[in-house]
Amino acid sequence: MQSYDLAAGTLREMNAALQAQAGTTNETAWEILNPQGRHAIAVGLDAPLDVTVNGPTGYYCAGMNKHATVRISGNAGPGVAENMMSGTVIVDGDASQYAGATGRGGLLVIRGNASSRCGISMKGIDIVVGGSVGHLSAFMAQAGRLVVLGDAGAALGDSIYEARLYVRGRVASLGADCEEKEMRDEHRGELAELLAAAGHDADPSAFRRYGSARKLYNFNIDKLDAY
Amino acid sequence: MCGIVGLFLKDPTLETRLGALMADMLVQMSERGPDSAGFAVYGAPGGSVRMTLRSESPAADFPLLDQALSQAIGAPVALMTRDTHAVLTLPAEALDAARAALPGLRPGLSVMSFGDVIEIYKEVGLPRDVASRFGLAAMPGTHGIGHTRMATESAVTTMGAHPFSTGPDQCLVHNGSLSNHNALRRDLIREGLTFETDNDSEVAAAYLTARMAEGANLGQALETGLTDLDGFYTFVVGTRDGFGVLRDPIACKPAVLAETDRYVAFGSEYRALAGLPGIEAAKVWEPEPATVYFWSR
């Protein structure tokens, strides 16, 4: 286990050390101590590392992650796992705004709640939230799956394209062009896989599915009121 | 972008450390607001009122000001200077006379705050420098609010820095921008409020002052603000014995609250709170949008 203490060293040095592991290393286990809410911890990783950040993080932790597993033992600040490409990011506590924004792949697991705009403009990432998500989650979502075991705030899936949203609790309101969809066997199947991957023992049939009504894809003068 | 910190103490044994804790919090928010900084500290009541004044030329304005003002209003006045600011202490019944007399005695002075316990200090410069110029770390108190500014809506000046105070023992700091502040300012001027700047945040402070002058408490004033204030905001406000937080319904501007048996703390980001005693065991959460949080002693 490699250990890096942010109280003693610099953030830039730590990120450079982690990024330098790409394709070359068998030093896969890393521990980051004393993060104390600093920004951009463990960003841009490109190797199958196993990184544990021991405490709360600030903006953009594990951003642009590729291949690595990053676990945050604490709360995550805004933009955790932003634009993740692959790998896994696990937040043991709550996540702030726009968790998993624009993510293209991989799995983001949030054990607590995520606040507003969770999965905004997601493009292939899978996000599993153990608690609830705030307003405008999956705004302009294009691909991927968002699973919420708790409730969803107002305007879920506003202006959504093709992502699939699964919510077990109450949805405060659906955004423009987002509608409830039929839960078929294939959906229960993929949901069961996502729940298992995130370590939740939950019944897929307790969830409802939401997705795009596909009415806003192209500009249509007759639907002006809906834009 | 701006940074906000706030600390409301429940445990009196922490009161001697208020300024030191706040100074560390303020410095942590330097990247969010490197152009100016300011803070309000609520100290112990002393049976008199205090006014915090600011001067462009303290060496000319402050010497003998206590004697001149005492003579003008016929009441004892004590003066303590801190860099560009000075705190006058005088009997409560002489406050109105003092406020009326000051412009004649020293035309260049600005009143930063007045009340039983509040003192406000703010200047252009890095938060660390501003905190050290005024000796924040040595100031005791029951609660305090600080702000680091990155100006977007008006000029980088001392008077454009936060906190803003428009009423006794009241202050407000703001991260965001209001879009209806000009219309609201005109309404408030008609209601009799006065403004020192073109700043949007001062309008929010004056708005709360006006509602509280009508009898609302801070929590109620913040509730009506949700309807009347349009724009982006995270506000932290202080009164003589209270401390409140409000975010707009869209809630783009970051906010973190922490509470323990000993204090309630606010930071734009967690890192502002990371040095507080017992933070590891604190309840830490992100305040909900359009929800009033309000503590009082």
Image (cartoon, coloured by chain):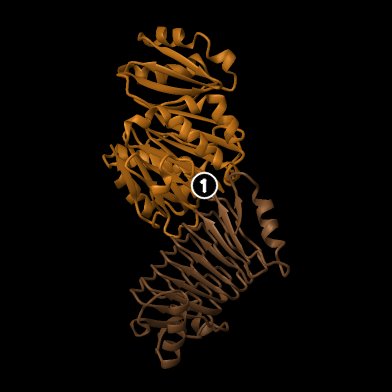
Chain colours: A brown, B orange
Residue at the outermost bottom position? A185
Quarter of the image where one finds residue A103: bottom right
Please state which of residues A91 and B284 is positioned toward the viewer in this rendering. Answer: A91
- Residue B200 lies, in percent from the top left, at 50, 44
Quarter of the image where one finds residue B69: top left
Q: Which amino acid is tagged 1?
A: Arg
Looking at the image, which residue is at 44% across and 50% down? Answer: B256
Number of numbered markers: 1
Q: Is residue B113 above or below residue B148?
A: above
Looking at the image, which residue is at 47% across and 15% down? Answer: B80
- Residue A68 lies, in percent from the top left, at 61, 68
Q: Secondary structure at mark 1?
A: helix
Note whether residue A140 is visible: yes
Note whether residue B188 is visible: no
Dot 1 falls on which chain?
Answer: B
User: Which corner quadrant holds the N terminus of chain A?
Assistant: bottom right
Looking at the image, which residue is at 50% across and 79% down? Answer: A145
Q: Residues within 10 Å of mark 1 (few under 14, many from 20)?
A: many
Please state which of residues B283 and B140 is positioned toward the viewer in this rendering. Answer: B283
Residue pointed to by mark 1:
B271
Please state which of residues A61 and B142 is positioned toward the viewer in this rendering. Answer: A61
Q: Is residue B171 above or below residue B284?
A: above
- Residue B260 lies, in percent from the top left, at 35, 44
> Image check: A209 left or right of A72?
left
- Residue A157 lies, in percent from the top left, at 46, 75
Looking at the image, which residue is at 55% across and 38% down? Answer: B27
